[in-house]
Image: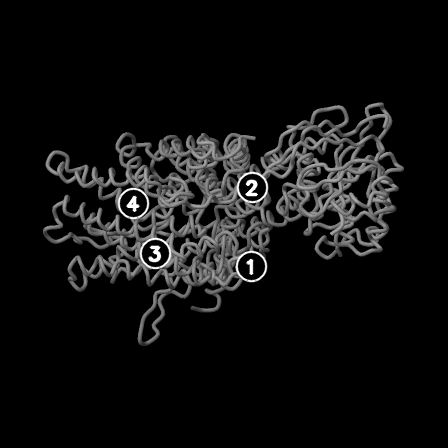
Amino acid sequence: MSELMLTVENLSAWYGAARILYDLNFNVGRGEVVALMGRNGAGKSTTMKAIMGLIAERQGVVTFNGGDISRLKPFEIARRGLGFTPEDRRIFVDLTVMENLDIGRQPPRNFPDGTPAPSWTPSSLFKLFPNLAEMPQRLGYRMSGGEQQMLTVARTLMGNPLLVLLDEPSEGVAPLIVEQMANTIVELKKEGLSILLSEQNIHFARLVSDRVYVLEKGQIHWQGSMTDLADNLDIQRAYLTV
Amino acid sequence: MTFSAFLFQALNGLSTASGLFFIAVGLSLIFGVSRIINIAHGSLYMLGTYIAYTFATHIDGGLGYWGGIVATALIVGVLGALIEIVLLRRIYRAPELFQLLATFALVLVINDATLWLWGPEDLLGPRAPGLRGAIEVFGRQLPSYDLFLIFIGPLVLILLHFALARTRFGRLVRAATQDREMVGALGVNQAVLFTSVFALGALLAGLGGALQVAREPANLATDLVAIGDAFVVVVVGGMGSISGAYLAAVIIAEVKALCIGIGVVDFGFVTVNFSKFTLVAEFLVMAAVLIARPYGLLGKPQAAVRSIAEPEEPIRPATPMLKTLAVIVLALLMCLPLLAQSSPYLLILGIDVLIAVIFATSLHFIMGPGGMHSFGHAAYFGLGAYGAALLVKWLGAPMGIALLVAPLAALAGALLFGWFAVRLSGVYLAMLTLAFAQIVWAAVFQWEGFTGGSNGVIGVWPPPPFDKSWVFFVLTLLLAIAAVLLLRRLLFAPFGYAMRAGRDSVLRAEAIGIDVKRVHWLAFAIAGGICGVAGGLFAFAKGSISPETISVGRSIDGLVMVLLGGIQTLTGPIVGASLYALLQDTVMRQTEYWRALLGIIILVLVLAFPQGIVGAAAHLFGKRRAP
């Protein structure tokens, strides 16, 4: 790991009186795909929302691309090049595919060392997601779950992010789409993007991730490389299999 | 009515519709994006009429008039932006009703500012240069300015439509209407978006006001009339839909025009003057639309707003300390009659406060634990007051009977209106209750033969010994205690638990066997009945009752009382009602500009405690972790 893109130190978060996250520490290197794994309710989505500034009651230090983003507003975090695709997709259902993409549009940006970050346009995204290319004028609510999933990733990429928080991309979509999504992630990694992925499905995570943090009840219980986790059936049984 | 006269009225209706559209469309846009119901929108419209008047009378010719209209729209737009930046931006995370309170305070402040700047007289502007004439349509004279209005409404509709459909700003507005948090997470600065939407909405209101200068005089009562109209149009058309706003404006204006056109009709057995229905026409249309299409003609169910307010704290039984405090307060109140000789005004004020307490506590019963935000609680106050007063007037009933009938009349009304109201929720429920209150008000106002019309009913004095103010005070105190204790008892009975469960989650409550609609309906009816007691007492306390005392202003007073005290506690409405009644009384006697003063006090409270006074107290006592 030459260079850290995202460092999370002692991240905690609350919903009202209920504490969800307990002093999480982890990081994502440049060009790395890191998976946050754990069962439903382990705190994966909350972690991503807290990083993104979407949870008001949070503590800890989040450093992204060399700058402290802990107290920034979500739009300021997004403008630093941190992209977020929520698990429930949250595409704008009254807007067309093209309009959804336009909402996510941001100017191209560079990495700190001056190399340009991958930059996207609707046409380059349509190459990445051929399904979307067939329906540029379709309204969001007329799209299938898989198509919506692609759109939400494409919409985030329109912001030319340096790192993407990808929350459960395999959830609730057809197996064919899951496979396509995995290919996409590999593709994005090749382009130089860093990805923090949340996932329950070890088969999916195996296809794409370099490293893993395993969450349970808002705490990190295991961390290591993807290959180590794949071999470690005890950890899988304890924290992942249902 | 001949066919040509009918068509002529229809044209008239279209020019009125343009006016309604201008008021409503900005409100709808603002609500869509920010979820703020801007009660001060009518005030911005009113400012438009005054500012345009000033331009038209100080600068001669077409420049003063037409240039003035453009300048007015821009000025009001900038003012709107300032309001958003200075005030609203601080309270987006506050509970919805608190935002209402803040914008209501603005209504008060703007109204007095207008009074101070322009004086109390109605100001009639000049007629529009270039459009002073009239053209002949269907054998009648149609002012050419009306014709201009007929076209300008749809023109603005089309412009807005294209702006929303084709520009990035429009796409952002539509996206934020659905999920503003996600828009922010994609890198869009919501603050700028909100400010510009608010400015645009204000600009449209200012434009609408400015365009009316040639037709109607600028008037200080315009603000509440305009916001009432705007609410109706927006709700009928569907929140957030601009085409819906125009459609609703046309329907309402045409129904009104039709009522005037039909005039008096003799059905043989009864003669009906349809022109009297103009006051209620829009509310009848709204009630009908909401019952058939709960989200308005072109509206969609509102997307849930994410992560805005905290869930309601559960209400708790009174602590021993609170009970002791209550006993002390009651003991002090019981001593008040001893002062009957030295300071008689204190008892009168005490009666006012106690009536306010009954009124606010009954409203809180459905607002807080019921989650039904009634904007028309004045209806049940009015039914109680008029029920009692009319019984005395027409049948010479004794006070005891009249005070018994007051809650029954209100209960009957609440049973009827509540049956419809509980089928809706949120803003739509609020608007339907407002519609019912306006229908009651208009019926009282128009049915002169029975209710005395605008003169009201006079001479409703209590018989001896209740004519002594201390005896009446004791009676009021006893009834207030009974009302408060009854409502409290209900809240801690299974009925009250069911009601709160239904508020927190309809789905889950129904899954455990609670008929939520029925429970809420009963709660609505009980609250109405108790409110009727306040109305009955009010009629006897004042010796008279008039439509003015049961107008929308009273409903708003009730909301302010409940919100001031805090919606999450049971003592809240009692404290809030007392505070508000005392404040109104003392402030009103201090200055001519009492509205502005009251408004500023409310604004300060809202800005100092953006989570509500009770929320602030809870934070103070450390019930929650400080993040």
The Cα atoms of the two marked residues, 3 and 4, are separated by 14 Å
Work out whether mark 2 precedes mark 4 in sequence or the reverse, and give the earlier one.
2
Work out whether mark 3 precedes mark 4 in sequence or the reverse, and give the earlier one.
4
Q: Chain of mark 2?
A: B
**As rendered, which of B552 and B363 lies closer to the eye?**
B363
Q: Residues within 10 Å of mark 3 (few under 14, many from 20)?
A: many
**In the rendering, at what x and y percent does residue A122 appear?**
82, 43
Q: Secondary structure at mark 2?
A: loop
Q: Chain of mark 4?
A: B
Residue designated by label 2: B308
Quarter of the figure that contains the N terminus of chain B: bottom left
Judge whether B386 appears above or below A88 on screen.
below
Residue at 15% over, 52% down: B462
Residue designated by label 1: B297
Q: Chain of mark 1?
A: B
Question: In the image, what residue type sits under mark 3?
Answer: Gly
Residue designated by label 3: B528
B575 sits to left or right of B172: left
One can see residue B601 in this view: yes
Q: Secondary structure at mark 4?
A: helix
Q: Quick check: marks 2 and 1 in contact, CB under 8 Å?
A: no
Question: In the image, what residue type sits under mark 1?
Answer: Leu
**In the rendering, at what x and y percent does residue A62 appear?**
70, 28
